[in-house]
């Protein structure tokens, strides 16, 4: 049976009452839930740069709790609300994901109108 990490395990606010933070498989893979740029006080920054920074930092916290890191990421799925935001997202992303894992980027509407970016990933332990 896979190991489930809760938001509480990671020391993060509950992102959704119906989702856990991550699943760790017996094969040593970590599958994360989506991470968005909401501050710990529940507020949402206006800029995509700050949202991206927070989202990646939260993702990194989940990975560390699982026993992995951003360097262990083998695939990223990025959601952005407008393709024109990608250069700004990429400027932050490239400083955090230095190993340049494969990534897909999809333009979508997110669950809250003020959210601009969301990331999820698969990583190795």
Image (spheres, helix red, strand yellow):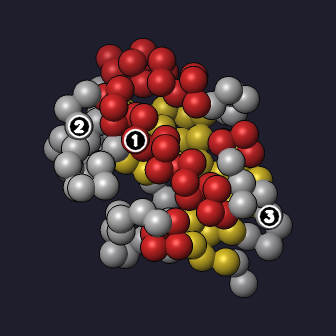
Quadrant (top left, top right, bottom left, bottom right) of the C terminus: bottom right
Farthest-out residue, bottom: 1
Which x, y percent locates residue 46? Answer: 20, 32
| Residue at x 62%, y 69% (from the top left corner) | 23
Q: Are marks 1 and 2 in contact (CB under 8 Å)?
A: yes
Secondary structure category for the residue under label 2: loop
Q: CA distance from mark 3 to mark 2?
A: 34 Å
Label 3 to label 1: alpha-carbon separation: 26 Å
Please give the name of the residue rendered at 33% of the width and 31% of the height, measured from the top-left corner: 50
Camera-nearest residue between 4 and 103: 4
Q: Mark 3 or mark 2, which is nearer to you?
A: 2
Q: Is residue 118 left or right of residue 98?
A: left
User: How far from the left and from the top, in percent, is residue 61?
Assistant: 55, 54
Residue 112 appears at what percent x and percent y?
Answer: 20, 50
Point 49% across, 59% down: residue: 33
Q: Secondary structure at mark 3?
A: loop
Q: Nearer the viewer, residue 107 or 124?
A: 124
Dot 3 corresponds to which residue?
Answer: 28
Q: Are marks 3 and 2 in contact (CB under 8 Å)?
A: no
> Rounded to the nearest whole Å, what is the CA distance between mark 1 and mark 2?
9 Å
The residue wearing badge 2 is 45
For the N terminus, which image quadrant? bottom right
Q: Earlier in the sequence, mark 3 or mark 1?
A: 3
In the picture of the structure, the residue carrying the numbered disc 1 is 54
Q: Are marks 3 and 1 in contact (CB under 8 Å)?
A: no
């Amino acid at each position: 049976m896979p190991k489930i990490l809760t938001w509480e395990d990671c020391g993060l606010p509950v992102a959704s009452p119906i989702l856990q933070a991550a699943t760790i498989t017996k094969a040593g893979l970590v599958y994360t839930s989506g991470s968005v740029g909401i501050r710990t006080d529940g507020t949402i920054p206006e800029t995509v740069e700050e949202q991206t920074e927070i989202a990646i930092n939260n993702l990194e916290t989940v990975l560390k709790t699982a026993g992995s890191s951003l360097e262990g990421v083998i695939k990223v799925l990025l959601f952005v609300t407008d393709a024109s935001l990608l250069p700004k997202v990429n400027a932050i992303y490239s400083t955090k994901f230095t190993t340049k894992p494969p990534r897909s980027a999809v333009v979508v509407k997110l669950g809250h109108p003020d959210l601009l970016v969301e990331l999820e990933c698969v990583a190795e332990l």
